[in-house]
Image: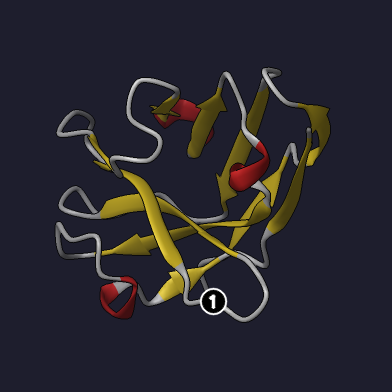
Amino acid sequence: QAQLEESGGGSVQAGGSLRLSCAASVRPFSRSVEAWFRQVPGKEREFVALMRSRGGSEFYADSVKGRFTISRDNPRNTVYLQMNNLKPEDTAVYYCARATEYTSNPSAYDLWGPGTQVIVAS
């Protein structure tokens, strides 16, 4: 069964950078979409960024546009989220997920990683 596992979370000062990785145990279907979401306690899971598994068609939440970049390394079956100019409001648990539909709706994603914590101190 396919699995996703995030890594790269941690604590950083505001204005700093982190790169999250999401390693997949199984290569995605050519029409799959991979995305990053985030969640803080008491709030709904929030869309961050997505891209098609074959590459391209990147899409970002307005709150991270211009600061975050999603990319992938196909030979490694790994998706990345480069996060620059981090703000305290970026503090959350970050999840990677996979779907067969190009959408920012988390309900459409049926494969999720366990998440990695990001803390941004002011």
Query: Total number of numbered labels?
Result: 1
Q: Is residue 18 left or right of residue 26?
A: right
Question: What percent of the width, then of the height, locates residue 104?
Answer: 24, 60
Residue identified by numbered label 1: 43
Q: Amino acid at mark 1?
A: Lys
Q: Is residue 19 left or right of residue 14?
A: left
Q: Residue at x 22, y 33 (%)?
A: 58
Question: What percent of the width, then of the height, locates residue 36?
Answer: 45, 51
Question: What percent of the width, then of the height, locates residue 107?
Answer: 31, 80
Q: Is residue 73 above or below residue 3?
A: above
Q: Is residue 52 above or below residue 76?
A: below
Picture quadrant where residue 111 is located: bottom left
Q: Residue at x 40, y 27 (%)?
A: 71
Picture quadrant where residue 47 is located: bottom left
Picture quadrant where residue 70 is located: top left
Q: Nearer the viewer, residue 85 or 113?
A: 85
